[in-house]
């Protein structure tokens, strides 16, 4: 299973953006993003990892179908 990260980026103690990483090379992407937002330049990155997910599933005569999934981060 691919790791799913959510990075919450702050700049000078103000919310700046959040970035979701959900690719097979998550560790490489995480390291690259952390290098692009250095703490000595005023950035702070909070790293959250998806531990579960909410799913909405439809069951029909053709079988189950995933309609939506939403990661749960901690």
Image: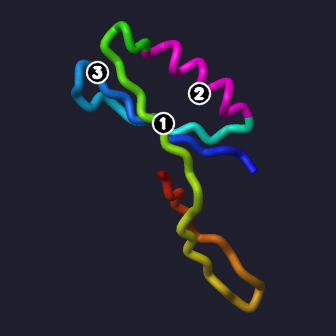
Q: Position of residue 66 (x, y in %)?
A: 64, 71
Range covered by the magenta-colored residues? 25-37
Question: Is 36 in front, or is 68?
Answer: 36
Q: Is residue 70 left or right of residue 64?
A: left
Q: Percent from the top left, x then y, of residue 4?
A: 60, 45
Q: Earlier in the sequence, mark 2 or mark 3?
A: 3
Q: Nearer the viewer, mark 1 or mark 2?
A: 1
Circle 2 is placed at which residue position?
A: 30
User: Where is residue 64, by image quadrant?
Assistant: bottom right
Does residue 11 appear to the left or right of 3 in the view shown? left
Could you tell which of marks 1 and 2 lies nearer the N-terminus?
2
Residues tagged 1 and 2 counted as in contact (Cβ below 8 A):
yes
Q: Which residue is mark 3?
A: 11
Label 2 secondary element: helix
Mark 3 surroundings within 10 Å by alpha-carbon count, few (fewer than 14), some (14 through 19), many (20 or more): some
Q: Earlier in the sequence, mark 3 or mark 1?
A: 3
Residue at 77% x, 85% y is 62
Q: Which mark is residue 33?
A: none
SS state under label 1: strand
Whole-angstrom CA distance, mark 3 to mark 1, is 15 Å
Q: What label does residue 47 carry, if any?
A: 1
Q: What's the residue at 43%, 16% (across, down)?
A: 37
Q: Is residue 30 magenta?
A: yes
């Amino acid at each position: 299973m691919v790791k799913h990260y959510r990075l919450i980026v702050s700049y000078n103690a103000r919310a700046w953006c959040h970035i979701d990483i959900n690719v097979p090379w998550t560790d490489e992407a995480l390291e690259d993003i952390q290098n692009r937002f250095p703490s000595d330049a005023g950035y702070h990155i909070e790293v959250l990892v998806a531990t579960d997910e909410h799913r909405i599933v439809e069951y029909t005569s053709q079988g189950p179908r995933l309609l939506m999934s939403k990661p749960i981060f901690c």
